[in-house]
Image (tube, helix red, strand yellow):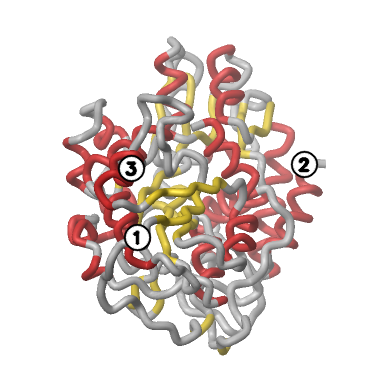
């Protein structure tokens, strides 16, 4: 789990990210809501399954394809290999940029893609539409995860939803009263917790400020925290500069934030659910909430390479990874909500799905999932240009000083 979360930090701390439109073989169009400001290359989904080809090359986030070599008790690969005859060759990647580059080699059949990588892979033609009729377990996936802006284009599915999670507000219950319900305790210049605030260390954290301003300064007209024009972007940057002296520590390793909460060096901050669970389990009095303004978060998708020579094994892997037992194992291993509701009956911790809000569409709708900012405004505006991730990165360096 630690490797997975640190990998996410690396993903979001990377420098320039390439926009997901205007690639070879595609034609640019006005950006649509959700970031689909492109027309994908014309590719067909697999029509029918054939004989398994004997192997499948899996490109995955650490922790998404475990075969027992890291922990003998953590293995959802071996059974798949015995059942299908498809040997699983796993390559772990550390950032979305790395995943995108590796997929271009054509050496990998399937990839677990986060929201910023998935759209780039679709736009470049490196992944193809998925025939969900050939994936029996797809029917069980929560409907609110299907045909989303990061895993489909024009209602054409490009993958199988895997799992998701939110970036929460957490606090020490013995130090912070009353219990907060808003991000104001993090951003208000008069917050009584100055010097004891813990914030996420990444340029993407600018989106958290934009999300806050979306509610508290509606005159800015922010519709999507990843689609910021000059004025909106400057307002978010200014808010983070105001917050800077109140932050005791920026974190990218959730274990370090957990330690800060336990020691009292931090009394509130942004956190993952796994951070809250760990800190609680080690005796610190902490709670968490998805604040009234909503939150940022992530959602991952399994996708099939357009160049894959092992399409049948690829489809069998996609079906397996969202099967109840495997989906439960993955979700528990590093801490997220599973995509298949039947996984909830398979988790060792019978409260896992309750803890991670599995199936709670209203909860999930309050999350603005990580998306790469590009110059084409992801909220559909065509009369202005938005700040791309390169500018977010430069601003973040300035904010931290």
Q: Helix or strand or loop: what does disc 1 sit on?
A: helix
171 on left or right of 361? right
Name the image quarter holding residue 242: top right
Which residue is located at x 59 percent, y 50 percent?
Answer: 209
Q: Is residue 29 above or below residue 388?
A: below
50 on left or right of 30? left
Q: In terms of depth relative to the viewer, which is nearer, 27 or 138?
A: 138
Q: Residue 124 location, x and y as percent? A: 57, 76
Give the CA distance from mark 3 to mark 2. 32 Å
Q: Can residue 215 be seen in the rendering of this structure?
A: no
Q: Helix or strand or loop: what does disc 2 sit on?
A: helix
Q: Mark 2 points at which residue?
A: 400
Q: Tell which tag, 3 or 1, sits nearer the viewer.
A: 1
Looking at the rendered image, the quarter that the C terminus falls into is top right
Q: Residue 49 location, x and y as percent? A: 26, 70
Give the CA distance from mark 2 to mark 1. 47 Å
Which residue is located at x 65 percent, y 27 percent?
Answer: 194
Q: Tell which tag, 3 or 2, sits nearer the viewer.
A: 3
Q: Name the residue under label 3.
A: 337
Q: Mark 1 points at which residue?
A: 313
Which residue is located at x 54 percent, y 37 percent?
Answer: 5
Q: Is the residue under label 2 in contact with that under label 3 (CB below 8 Å)?
A: no
Q: Is the residue marked by circle 2 packed among few (<14), some (14-19), or many (20+) residues within 10 Å?
A: few
Q: Is residue 172 above or below residue 180?
A: above
Name the image quarter holding residue 249: top right
Residue 89 is labelled as none
Q: Helix or strand or loop: what does disc 3 sit on?
A: strand
């Amino acid at each position: 789990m630690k490797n997975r979360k640190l990998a996410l930090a690396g993903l979001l701390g990377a420098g320039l990210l390439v926009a997901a439109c205007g690639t070879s073989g595609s034609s640019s169009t006005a950006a649509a809501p959700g970031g689909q400001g492109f027309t994908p290359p014309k590719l067909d989904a697999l029509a029918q399954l054939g004989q398994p080809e004997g192997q499948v090359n899996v490109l995955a986030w650490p922790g998404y394809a475990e075969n027992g070599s890291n922990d003998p008790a953590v293995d959802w690969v071996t059974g798949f290999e015995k059942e299908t005859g498809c040997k699983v060759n796993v390559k772990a990647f550390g950032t979305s940029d790395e995943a995108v580059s590796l997929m271009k080699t054509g050496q990998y059949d399937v990839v677990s893609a986060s929201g910023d990588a998935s759209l780039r892979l679709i736009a470049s033609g490196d992944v193809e539409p998925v025939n969900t009729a050939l994936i029996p377990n797809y029917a069980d996936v929560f409907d609110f995860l299907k045909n989303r802006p990061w895993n489909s284009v024009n209602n054409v599915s490009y993958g199988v939803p895997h799992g998701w999670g939110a970036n929460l507000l957490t606090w020490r219950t013995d130090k912070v009263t009353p219990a907060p319900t808003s991000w104001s305790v993090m951003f208000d210049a008069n917050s009584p917790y100055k010097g004891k605030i813990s914030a996420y260390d990444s340029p993407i954290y600018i989106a958290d400020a934009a999300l806050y301003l979306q509610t508290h300064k509606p005159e800015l007209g922010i519709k999507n925290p990843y689609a910021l024009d000059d004025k909106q972007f400057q307002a978010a940057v200014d808010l983070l500069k105001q917050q800077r002296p109140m932050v005791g520590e920026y974190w990218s390793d959730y274990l370090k934030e957990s330690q800060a909460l336990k020691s009292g060096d931090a009394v509130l901050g942004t956190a993952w659910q796994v951070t809250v669970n760990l800190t609680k389990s080690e005796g610190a009095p902490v709670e968490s909430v998805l604040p009234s303004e909503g939150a940022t978060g992530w959602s991952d998708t399994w996708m099939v390479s357009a160049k894959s020579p092992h399409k049948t094994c690829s489809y069998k892997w996609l079906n397996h990874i969202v099967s109840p037992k495997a989906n439960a194992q993955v979700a528990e291993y590093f801490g997220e909500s599973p995509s298949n509701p039947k996984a909830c009956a398979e988790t060792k911790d019978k409260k896992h799905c309750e803890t991670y809000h599995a199936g709670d569409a209203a909860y999930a709708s309050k999350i603005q999932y990580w998306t790469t900012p590009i110059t084409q405004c992801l909220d559909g505006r065509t009369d202005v240009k938005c700040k791309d991730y390169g500018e977010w990165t430069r601003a973040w360096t300035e904010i931290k000083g």
